[in-house]
Image (tube, rainbow, N blue to C red):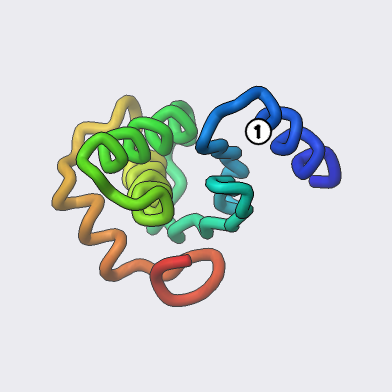
C-alpha cells in the first residue's frame, strides 16, 4: 500500500476534484479538497462473484453524487453496492433499497456501519 499515497497525489495533481481508489475487502480511499479518507468495505454474507465489484462501487458513487450526495455518503453507498454485487453471480440486479439496507444493517471492515 506504500505506492497508493504517491499515486493519489499524482492523480490529484492532474486536476480532478475527487479521487477514488478501491482496495477490495480493505475498503477504499477518497480524496476530496486535499483530504484523504478511508471508506471501509461492508462485510458480505458470502463471496459469490467479485467480478465487477469495483465498477459497481464507481457506479454507486456516481449515482449518489449525481443526486447531490456528499462525497463521503456517495462512497459509503458505492461500498454497499459493491457488497451487494459480490453476493450474487453476474451483474448487479438489485435495487437502491437493497443497497440502503446494507448501509443500515451491515458491519464494515472498521466496525458497525459507516466510516
Q: Residue at x 52, y 56 (%)?
A: 39
- Residue tagged by mark 1? 12
Residue 83 visible in image: no
Is residue 38 shown above or below 64? below
Residue 105 placement, left or right of 43: left
Q: Residue 48 in the image: x percent, y percent?
A: 42, 40
Q: Residue 61 occupies which quadrant of the picture?
A: top left
Place residue 112 in its image quadrant: bottom left
Residue located 56% across and 36% down the image: 19
Q: Residue at x 51, y 37 (%)?
A: 18
**Where is residue 81 shown, x and y percent of the image?**
33, 44
Instruction: Describe the element under mark 1 as helix, strand or loop.
Output: helix
- Whole-percent x, y for residue 68 in the image: 24, 44
How many marks are shown on the rendered structure? 1
Please determine whether, in this image, residue 37 is positioned above or below residue 34.
below
Q: Quadrant of residue 12?
A: top right
Which one is in front, 72 or 48? Answer: 72
Taking 45 as reference, is 6 left or right?
A: right
What residue is at 26 percent from the left and 68 percent from the top?
104
Residue 97 makes an appearance in the image: yes
Q: Farthest residue in the bottom direction?
A: 112
The local crowd at label 1, few if under 14, some if 14 to 19, many if 20 or more residues have their Cα within 10 Å, is some
Amino acid at each position: 500500500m506504500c505506492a497508493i499515497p504517491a499515486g493519489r497525489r499524482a492523480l490529484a495533481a492532474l486536476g480532478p476534484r475527487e479521487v477514488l481508489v478501491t482496495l477490495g475487502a480493505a475498503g477504499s480511499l477518497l480524496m476530496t479538497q486535499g483530504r484523504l479518507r478511508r471508506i471501509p468495505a461492508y462485510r458480505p454474507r458470502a463471496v459469490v462473484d467479485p467480478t465487477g465489484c469495483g465498477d459497481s462501487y464507481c457506479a454507486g458513487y456516481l449515482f449518489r453524487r449525481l443526486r447531490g450526495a456528499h462525497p463521503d455518503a456517495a462512497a459509503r453507498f458505492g461500498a454497499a453496492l459493491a457488497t451487494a454485487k459480490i453476493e450474487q453471480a453476474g451483474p448487479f440486479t438489485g435495487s437502491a433499497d437493497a443497497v440502503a439496507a446494507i448501509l443500515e444493517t451491515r458491519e464494515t471492515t472498521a466496525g458497525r456501519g459507516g466510516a
